[in-house]
Amino acid sequence: MSRNKMIWNPERECAEREQMHDLQSRQLTSMIRRMYDHVPFYRDRLKAAGIEPGDIRSADQLKMLPFTTKSDLRDNYPFGLFTVPQSEVIRLHASSGTTGKPTVVGYTRQDIDLWAEVVARSLTMAGIHSGDTIQIAYGYGPFTGGLGLHYGAEKVGATVIPISSGNTRKQLQFMTDFNATALACTPSYAAHLGEHILKEGIPPEEIRLRAGIFGAEPWSNEMRREIENMLHIKAYDIYGLSEVIGPGVSMECDCQHGSHIFEDHFIPEIIHPETLEPLPDGEVGELVFTTISKEAMPLLRYRTRDLTRLHRGKCPCGRTLVRMEKCLGRSDDMLIIRGVNVFPSQVESVLMEMAETSPHYLLIVRRENNLDTLEVRVEINEKNWSDSIRELEGIRRRIEHNIKSLLGISAIIRLVEPNSMERSDGKARRIIDYRKQ
């Protein structure tokens, strides 16, 4: 680790662009050869594109190569995309699958070391080091969140509380008794913990949290401020997905001008989600990753479905790594309502700007008489819940007006009482679309 405690690996994180490009090109060339030699799926795809391994010599040639999708992972379930024999795979993770088959990811020992490295870089960006105690409330098990943060936290020398998700009362007990200084979980669960701290009347001096490492679901900057106010912390966005490696693909530094992508391991691209053509920096599109240093299961131009944009140029923190903006949402979570594109994060930003609402809401879409309708159910916080119909109607009308001003369409607003909506210790469910049922 460098003398600058906010940069874990300055040689890579602060590399000159030409140096990074050369490294990416060498690793990509090697990866293509391994895929061609050991994975029939990729060999067939490359042959169909008229590409031999020797044809690829530069990272600039990525746009010539075929994409990989989540369907490809499921079609090759469970081990069809592995480039190493199973005897070299020391860990398996899997994400839940809507089709009955999960997506399976394998790791060699070198992959686990790589994962710990990028998470160590991430935690260092949030100022977490050997003097900290981090409470990891992501799920442990097949989900990558818990163990991914765990190994990185141990690498930086922090004390780990591996409590996993759920059991809110135990979470608060450990947080206070063990003097946790950092919390890692989904943002919706962080908001849930903040509500319980207020509800239980736990004195602020008993909560020693300084930083929060939140990810695994889209969340707005308005929700960030809400969590920061409740927990008296600085909240950082960590990004990852199990198919690429897990948490630690990118992370916000203290400047919070976007999340730095560890592009010495993951080459990012932005493409148009329909035409699949590459888009220039600064334009919103679908994020695509090529994993150039993973051993067990490297991926070629993997379509994440996450929508964001990229920015290059040196950050005030000193890093030269490309930055991605906070994800607007997923292309497959985008709702098209009466011809208007709607993302849950847009509605969330409206709700979080209002003092009367909590961070808990649900979007319900129906089609009635051939017309799409959007219903927004939102919890009112306890302080503003009132028996006065006039007061509640005033809140409802302001939400209705603000959403229409932002989106350009009307929504049906239903206010529900505090603590009445389902809480999740994992990813929050934000959408019910009855048009698909």
Image (cartoon, grey):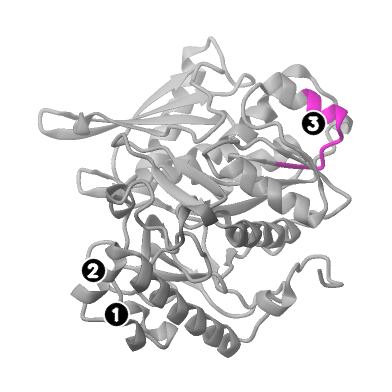
Q: Give, as a three-letter code, the residue at label 1.
A: Met
Q: Residues within 10 Å of mark 3 (few under 14, many from 20)?
A: many
The image shows residue 179 at horizontal and vertical percentages of 87, 35
> Residue furthest toward the top?
387
The image shows residue 329 at horizontal and vertical percentages of 41, 50
State the residue position of label 1.
64
Q: Give, as a three-letter code, the residue at label 3.
A: Met
Q: Which residues are magenta?
A: 173-183
Mark 2 element type: helix
Q: Which mark is residue 175?
A: 3
Mark 3 element type: helix
Q: Quadrant of residue 431?
A: top left
Instruction: Estimate the spatial distance between the alpha carbons at disc 1 and disc 3, rounded to whole Å.
Output: 50 Å
State the residue position of label 2.
44
Q: Nearer the viewer, residue 36 or 434?
A: 36
Q: Is residue 403 above or below residue 305?
A: above
* Residue 219 seen in the figure: no
Q: Nearer the viewer, residue 74 or 225?
A: 74
Q: Based on the picture, tell me whether residue 2 belongs to the magenta stretch.
A: no
| In the displayed structure image, the side of residue 270 where residue 143 appears, left or right | right
Q: Residue at x 37, y 62 (%)?
A: 302
* Residue 46 seen in the figure: yes
Q: Are marks 2 and 1 in contact (CB under 8 Å)?
A: no
Q: Give, as a three-letter code, the residue at label 2.
A: Asp
Q: Is residue 45 above or below residue 208?
A: below
Q: Residue at x 32, y 61 (%)?
A: 68
Q: Residue at x 53, y 70 (%)?
A: 293
